[in-house]
Image (tube, rainbow, N blue to C red):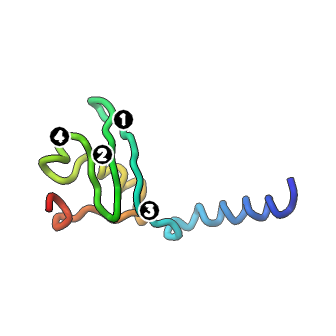
Amino acid sequence: MDYSMISKMEKAKKYAKERERFIFKSFQVSVEGSNGPHLVTYDGGKWSCDCSFFQTRGRCSHTMSLEIILEGMVDIAYEDQQKE
């Protein structure tokens, strides 16, 4: 492996430890829930999930688990952001 690639790999490891460098703007994730898979979407700071609980409450275990995993990298859904 050449020196420039080794340098890039070291830089990547450094960046990966500095989570504040990464701000997710939008993505979709399939979350394997207890009752099957659910599609969670994050777009422009807004969460969405196709589960029935999210449809009535604006927040669910699927979105909250991703908030925990991605802490500091996405906005957290607060009461004023739910079910507008």
* Residue 32 badge: 1
How many C-alpha atoms fall within 10 Å of the one at disc 1: few (<14), some, or many (≥20)?
A: few
Residue labelled with disc 3: 24
Q: Give the alpha-carbon distance from disc 1 to disc 4, as whole Å.
A: 15 Å
How many C-alpha atoms fall within 10 Å of the one at disc 2: few (<14), some, or many (≥20)?
A: many
* Residue at (17, 40) in percent of width and height: 52
* Residue 58 badge: none
Dot 3 falls on a residue whose secondary structure is loop
Q: Return the disc, 3 or 4, that comes first in the chain's sequence.
A: 3
Q: Are marks 3 and 2 in contact (CB under 8 Å)?
A: no
Residue labelled with disc 4: 52
Q: Give the alpha-carbon distance from disc 2 to disc 1, as whole Å.
A: 9 Å
Q: 49 or 20: nearer the eye?
A: 49
Residue type, label 1: Glu
Horizontal side of residue 43 vs 73, given as left or right: left
Horizontal side of residue 62 vs 84, given as left or right: right
Q: Return the disc, 3 or 1, that comes first in the chain's sequence.
A: 3
Q: Return the disc, 1 or 4, that comes first in the chain's sequence.
A: 1
Residue type, label 3: Phe
Q: Do the residues labelled 1 and 4 touch (CB within 8 Å)?
A: no
Dot 2 falls on a residue whose secondary structure is helix
* Residue 61 image offset from top left, x and y in percent: 26, 46
